[in-house]
Amino acid sequence: MPVIDVKPDLDNLTLTITAEFAAPVERVWQIYADPRQLEKVWGPPTYPATFVDHDLAPGGRVTYYMTGPEGEKFAGYWQVTAVDEPRSFSFDDGFADEDFNPNPDLPVSRNVYSFASTESGTRATYTSTFASAEGLQTVLDMGVVEGSTLAINQIDEFLAAGN
């Protein structure tokens, strides 16, 4: 199971998830760089993702939606702020309407995804920082820990299948 630690920290307004994968950093990076691969692991298994736009470059925008079991769609976007291939990328992550316009009623988080080599593969650290404790609590209440853990835990199986 790739996720080895989950730390919500209301005092520091962060949620940090740490995972380890049995693949080199460059291979893990490819999952995030390729929207068709990312679709296989972004979102929990019962909420598969479809990426519409995917410009993983500073200033780029990524848009996607997850489709729920009843066919309902939940849209989101990333505004990419930094890329250090294959070690890390940073982005603002927000909820959106069906046209990918930001939803001002839900929080935006600043995210840093970093990847480091280990003896057995890659250690990934996913850190989300919120503007307020209320914003962090909102996504915690929405099930972000459970959803993210289910999503990230799909990566080893995806890689093991030779993808």
Image: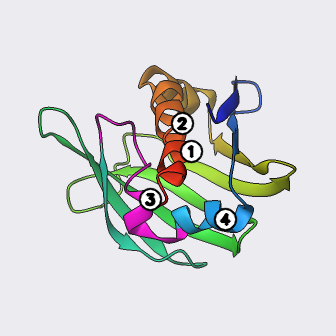
Comparing labels 4 and 3, the label whose residue is closer to the camera: 3
Query: Can residue 90 be spotted in the picture?
Result: no
User: Residue 129: where, in percent of width, then height?
Assistant: 66, 43
Q: Residue visible at 12% across and 32% down?
A: 70
Q: Residues within 10 Å of mark 2 (few under 14, many from 20)?
A: many
From the viewer's perspective, is residue 91 above or below residue 135?
Answer: below
Taking the magenta stretch, the answer to whether it contains residue 135 is: no
Q: Which residue is mark 2?
A: 153
Say whether residue 113 is left or right of residue 157.
Answer: right
Q: Residue visible at 39% across and 53% down?
A: 40
Magenta stretch?
33-47
In this rendered view, identify the residue nearer to me: 46 or 15. Answer: 46
**Earlier sequence position, callout 1 versus callout 4:** 4
**Earlier sequence position, callout 4 versus callout 2:** 4
Comparing labels 1 and 2, the label whose residue is closer to the camera: 1
Q: Which residue is mark 3?
A: 38
The Cα–Cα distance between marks 1 and 4, rounded to whole angstroms, is 20 Å
* Amino acid type assigned to the residue bearing label 4 in the image: Phe
From the viewer's perspective, is residue 151 above or below residue 1?
Answer: below
Q: Residue visible at 50% across and 43% down?
A: 157
Check whether the beta carbons of the residues at disc 4 and disc 3 lie within 8 A of each other: no
The Cα–Cα distance between marks 1 and 2, rounded to whole angstroms, is 7 Å
Q: Which residue is mark 1?
A: 156
* Amino acid type assigned to the residue bearing label 3 in the image: Leu
Quadrant (top left, top right, bottom left, bottom right) of the N terminus: top right
**Earlier sequence position, callout 2 versus callout 3:** 3
Check whether the beta carbons of the residues at disc 1 and disc 2 lie within 8 A of each other: yes
**Quarter of the view holding residue 86:** bottom right
User: Residue 32: where, in percent of width, then height?
Assistant: 54, 63
